[in-house]
């Protein structure tokens, strides 16, 4: 019995279709999970907004709900000999020479690759977007996006700009060949 040509090529169509559908589904699920984590953080923070206690802790997770980002955070280490930072492939990195998330002073720097799985979606940040940072000792920090700037990778002045009010700075690559760095600044809104 002869099988029609359309039935013989059906597996090829299924494979090609799945190459397009699976990444879209994965991105959709990342956004759903990040939005859920953001709603949870907001509900926890809403119950303690008037608390004036000092909070600080080692960052373990970052969530940007509108961008669909929900990532673990690992320590980023600076190698002074080679003058490079360690960059984890699929997680965010905490620049350990900067302040831990806190509600007293200085900004925390978290950085990562500009891939779609890490900080690539931050290219669509809008003023007022939220970021949530969770710490190892159970604190949650809510930050509101303010602005961004693009710098050269050799610009070490960024570390001087992290002093002062408590906040968050995210950093990822920028440019056609990832030749620059995009710094995104967030102000602390609340902490629990």
Image (spheres, rainbow, N blue to C red):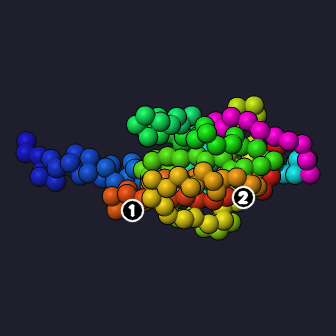
Quadrant occupied by the C terminus: top right
Label 2 CA crowd tier, 10 Å (few <14, some 14–19, many 20+):
many
Q: Is residue 156 shown left or right of residue 108?
A: left
CA distance for labels 2 and 1 = 25 Å
Q: Residue 51 colored magenta?
A: yes
Quadrant occupied by the N terminus: top left
Q: Nearer the viewer, residue 81 or 142?
A: 81
**Could you tell which of marks 2 and 1 lies nearer the N-terminus?**
1
Residue 5: x and y in percent read 11, 52
Report how many numbered discs are placed on residues in the image. Answer: 2
Residue at image coords 69%, 42%: 99
Q: Bounds of the magenta span?
A: 50-60
Q: Residue 23 colored magenta?
A: no
Main SS category, magenta section: loop
Q: Nearer the viewer, residue 107 or 89?
A: 107
Kindly give the residue lying farthest to the front in the view shown: 81
Residue at image coords 81%, 40%: 55
Label 1 CA crowd tier, 10 Å (few <14, some 14–19, many 20+):
few
SS category of the residue bearing label 1? loop
Residue at image coords 60%, 51%: 159
Residue 59: x and y in percent read 66, 38
On the image, numbered disc 1 is attached to which residue? 175
Q: Nearer the viewer, residue 65 or 80?
A: 80
Q: Are marks 2 and 1 in contact (CB under 8 Å)?
A: no
On the image, numbered disc 2 is attached to which residue? 187
Residue 89: x and y in percent read 43, 39
SS category of the residue bearing label 2? strand
Q: Looking at the picture, does residue 131 appear above or below residue 61?
A: below
């Amino acid at each position: 019995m002869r099988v029609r040509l359309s039935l013989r090529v059906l597996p090829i169509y299924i494979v090609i279709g799945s190459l397009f559908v699976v990444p879209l589904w994965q991105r959709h699920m990342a956004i759903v999970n990040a939005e859920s984590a953001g709603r949870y953080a907001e509900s926890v923070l809403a119950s303690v907004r008037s608390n004036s206690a000092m909070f600080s802790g080692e960052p373990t997770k970052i969530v940007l709900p509108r961008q669909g980002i929900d990532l673990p955070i690992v320590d980023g280490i600076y190698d002074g000999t080679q003058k490079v930072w360690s960059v984890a492939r699929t997680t965010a990195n905490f620049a350990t020479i900067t302040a831990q998330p806190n509600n007293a002073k200085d900004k925390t720097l978290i950085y990562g690759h500009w891939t779609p799985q890490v900080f690539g979606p931050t290219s669509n940040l809008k003023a007022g977007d939220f970021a949530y940072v969770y710490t190892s000792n159970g604190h949650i920090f809510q930050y509101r996006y303010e602005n961004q700037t693009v710098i050269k990778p050799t610009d070490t002045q960024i570390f001087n700009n992290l002093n002062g009010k408590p906040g968050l700075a995210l950093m990822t690559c920028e440019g056609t060949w990832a030749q620059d760095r995009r710094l995104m600044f967030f102000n602390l809104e609340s902490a629990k």
